[in-house]
Each structure stands twice: as C-alpha cells, then as structure tokens.
Image: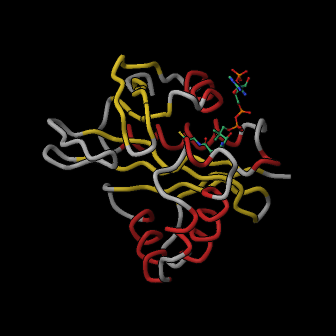
Amino acid sequence: MTLAVRRVRAGEGERVRELRLRAVSDPGASIAFLTTYEQEVSRDQAFWDDRAAGGADGDSAAMFVAESDAAWIGTCTVLVRRTGDVDHTGRRLTSGRADVVGVYVDPPHRGTGAIDALLDTAARWTAAVGFETLSLDVHVDNARAQAVYRRAGFVPTGETFTGPIGAELAMSRSLRTL
Ligand SMILES: CC(C)(COP(=O)(O)OP(=O)(O)OC[C@H]1O[C@@H](n2cnc3c(N)ncnc32)[C@H](O)[C@@H]1OP(=O)(O)O)[C@@H](O)C(=O)NCCC(=O)NCCS
C-alpha cells in the first residue's frame, strides 16, 4: 500500500464531495466540522466543482488529499486570510493568517501516518507562499486531534473562544525551520 499526499485538481469535485460526506458522517463530526451532513448533501455539483477548483490553484486556498493507492483516504485544507477578512468562525482579522481546516482521515487509515503527511505538506505549502506561522482551531473536547496537532508541532496560543461548534482553542505552529 502506498501513501501519497497531493493537491486536489480542478475537475475532482465529485471526489471532494464524497470525501466531505464521509467526514461529516464521522461520529466525531459535531466537534470537528462547522457543517453538517444535511447541509453538505444538499449542495449542488457546482459547489463541489468550485471547491475543487478553488483548492487546486493559486495562493488563497490549497486542499490536500492523501491517497492510499488510488483511493482518497484523508484531507486537509489551508485557507489564507487577508487583513479585514472574516474567518470561518466569524472573527474579523487584524492581520493575515493561514488556517488549517477540514482535517479528516478515514477510520481504517487512522494511526498510519496519513495525517502527519497531510499536515507536513500543508505546512510546507504555507511556508512557500510566505507565512511564518500556520494556525488552526480545535474543539476543546477533540483530544485526539489536539494530540495529533501537538505531535505536528502546533502549540496552544492561549486564545480560546466559543465558535459555531462550541468551545474551541487556537493552536499555531512556527514554519521558520522549514
Ligand atoms: C483527527 C484525525 C485527523 C487524526 O488522525 P489519526 O490518524 O486518527 O491520528 P493518529 O492515530 O496518528 O494520532 C492520534 C493521537 O491521538 C492520541 N489519542 C487518541 N485518542 C485520544 C484520546 N481520546 N484522548 C487523547 N489523545 C488521544 C493518540 O495517542 C495519538 O497521539 P500520540 O501519537 O501522541 O500518541 C482523525 O482522527 C480524524 O479524522 N478524526 C475525525 C475528524 C476530526 O476530528 N478532525 C479534526 C478536526 S479539528
């Protein structure tokens, strides 16, 4: 079995949709994702085609997928925010920021290193587009995700807030050594 991480390609909207529907069906989805299965399943194909195209090229968003042989088994996305943007939690930003969102690995592939490869690829891309820090928010009860992020070099910033899914904490990772 081979594991590879790559950026999504324009035209892969159907695969993006299938993976997202699996993610929001996860038993832990309510403390992981800002949208529900019902919201995602009701979107039309143009939405998913746009999401794939938006994550495939340019410096504003990058969606990465982990492939085991040819199958997609995990994903994460980096969203680049500019000063004045409103982020995915509704906060207006006073400076630019790169956030990891949409982190998911299929259950049979958990504990295999897929998430480490995804986060490493995301960090390298973020450094390459000029950021010195990579940020994320994680639900206070999502202990497994927090452990993974700590292993990947993220540390709590000390900021906590109540977002759409409840109490979250912010973590960030320096990219200066990459
Ligand atoms: C979060 C996710 C991507 C992590 O990937 P993974 O392959 O499961 O992670 P790993 O198995 O490599 O690592 C899990 C870590 O959590 C730890 N862990 C597992 N269960 C735990 C628990 N209940 N409490 C605390 N730590 C826990 C493990 O010990 C391991 O840490 P270690 O390597 O320091 O020992 C995956 O579990 C997932 O997709 N979960 C559902 C969606 C989600 O929560 N996404 C994140 C949104 S912020």
State the residue at coordinates (62%, 26%): 143
- The percent coordinates of residue 17 (x first, y second) are 58, 71
Q: In the rendered image, which quarter is residue 93 located in?
A: top left
Q: Is residue 105 left or right of residue 137?
A: right
State the residue at coordinates (38%, 37%): 127
Towards the viewer: 55 or 22 = 22
- The percent coordinates of residue 139 (x first, y second) are 50, 33
Q: Residue furthest right?
A: 1
- The percent coordinates of residue 133 (x first, y second) are 35, 29
Classify the position of the C terminus by image quarter: top left
State the residue at coordinates (36%, 16%): 158
State the residue at coordinates (31%, 36%): 131
For ligand 1, give the image quadrant: top right
Q: Is residue 160 above or below residue 137?
A: above
Looking at the rendered structure, the number of numbered marks drawn on it comes to: 0
Q: Is residue 50 above or below residue 8?
A: below
